[in-house]
Amino acid sequence: MTTVALNSWEGKCVMITTIMASAMTFIDGTALNVVLPSLQKSLHATGASVFWILNAYMLVLASLILIGGSLGDKLGRKKVFMWGILIFIIGSGLCGLVTNVMQLIIFRIVQGIGGALMIPGSLSLISSSINEKERGKAIGTWSSVTTMVTLGGPILGGALGDAGLWRYIFFINIPIGLFALFFLNRYVKEIKDETSNRSLDIAGALSLAMGLALLTFGFLRAPAIGFYNWEIWTSLSTGLLLLFAFFFIEKKSMYPMMPLWLFKNMTFTGTNLLTFFLYAGLGGAMLFIGLNLVQVQGYSQLQSGLAFLPFTILMIMLARYAGTLSDKYGPRFFLIIGPTIAGIGLSLLSFVHQTQGPKDYWISFFPGILVFGFGMSITVAPLTATIMGSVSDRYSGTASGVNNAISRISSVFANAIFGALAVLLFTRHLKDNLTTLNLDERSKQEVMAQSVNLGNATAPKNLSFEMAALIQKQYHEGFIDSYVHVMLFSAILCFLGALMSLGFVKKNALKNIAS
């Protein structure tokens, strides 16, 4: 397969189109996290519903993204990429028109289908089109420029959320997607594996989707009815059985969507384990920091978006440079030290309790976000380049799909498990502290009923002003207790990611690429 130089006209066109298409998902994700408090209030969504809004997209994406990568290899990476963009922007438009939570969850599924076809195409186009010696630099450029393009995501999301216009977070994807489609159609050549004759692994996709959905349902439902309820155990055990079935299907299938033999390469295995732990920590941390800032610390949604700017600026400044250094010196050092620093940053954030709002930002959230951002910025490009470089070009689409699926699966687990943990800790805090307040049994039940809303919980209206203030204080303290635990667990996940690199990634990891 012929490759081109990064600075050639064709190379530049590949970079422009992949960056613009990828920017949609980045903007959608970063802005959505910021506007979740506004969305939750507007649609009267419970805390569990918020996690389902996130997980509906992630579940479908994780389940189908592997098929999306294989389809790109088989039918043409440009063609599948373009279909993914089209479906994604249709789903985005529908999300912007919803009137209730259930509709939003359904249309997030449509977005997930589009994303599953679109996301693998981005990196596989780069890996199969750009000269091998410049691939790390190209991926670093993709990482940094995509981040730069989406710099306004949290800020825009915050401004629109404060104005009650959160729906425009979805509408903004439409012009970006149309722009990417135009350039793809006009300037980018079709790239596909002419030797591919694989059929689609529908059985694998269904077992993975159903397994993840049942596990998510079990974890998010457990706080309401208890972990010992038969419904929870049935859901969790069936979900686990379906995931085991998925691996069995992949092992026996002639054309698996996740070829297990790829994991015989220790570099591929180690970097995907790193991806799982690192992105689980990232997903849980970013979600709870955003909710904490708005619902407990008193930030506006715009101020919440601005709070993440140090993270984004570091990604812009360092990602490409880290990719270049990784090409020159090898990725191992970056894949050990980067997640370790990110974990230290999340540990720092776990020490932040109740503050006096934005005026305390520089001595509360800023140091942790800065350290966390630095760790992530020196990890992302070397990690992606190492994964894509550990397989031959003909499997680049599949490798991209596997890695993206793993990052999304980790987010599904993080949202489900951290969501359940947060509600359990929040509920326990309320139970322990309500005994000290002079409330009748009915009022206590009304107070406890709000626990499903986490930081958005509000004191019952029939209480006196003084008692309502005390209850609201307990709600805030309960959420902060949950937040602290989530940050600590997220930090541990980052440290586990660093251990994966230490154990699996060798100094000369990319010297002998599997053919």
Image (spheres, rainbow, N blue to C red):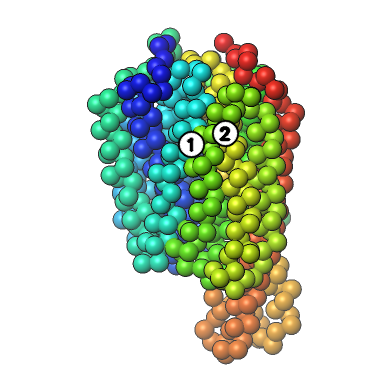
x, y percent for residue 338: 65, 39
Q: Is residue 100 above or below residue 11?
A: below
**Which residue appears at 42% of the width and 11% of the height?**
1
x, y percent for residue 143: 48, 36
**Which residue appears at 63% of the width and 13% of the height?**
512
> Considering the numbered disc 2 on the image, is that residue within a helix, a strand or a loop?
helix
Gap in Å between the C-alphas at discs 1 and 2?
11 Å
**Which residue appears at 63% of the width and 77% of the height?**
473
Q: Is residue 124 above or below residue 62?
A: above
Q: Around disc 1, counting alpha carbons within 10 Å, would you say few (fewer than 14), some (14 to 19), or many (20 or more)?
A: many
Disc 2: which residue:
322
Look at label 1 and name its amino acid. Ser
Disc 1: which residue:
143
Q: Around disc 2, counting alpha carbons within 10 Å, would you say few (fewer than 14), some (14 to 19), or many (20 or more)?
A: many
x, y percent for residue 213: 54, 44
Residues tagged 1 and 2 counted as in contact (Cβ below 8 A): no
x, y percent for residue 149: 40, 44
Left or right side of 138 for 272: right
Left or right side of 162 for 221: right
Q: Is residue 466 visible?
A: yes
**Which mark is first along the chain, 2 or 1?**
1
Tag of residue 316: none
Left or right side of 186 for 105: right
How many discs appear? 2
Report the quarter where the C terminus lies. top right
> Considering the numbered disc 1 on the image, is that residue within a helix, a strand or a loop?
helix
Front position in the image: 139 or 416: 139
Front position in the image: 424 or 338: 338
Look at label 2 and name its amino acid. Ala
Q: Is residue 461 above or below residue 456?
A: below
Front position in the image: 454 or 190: 190
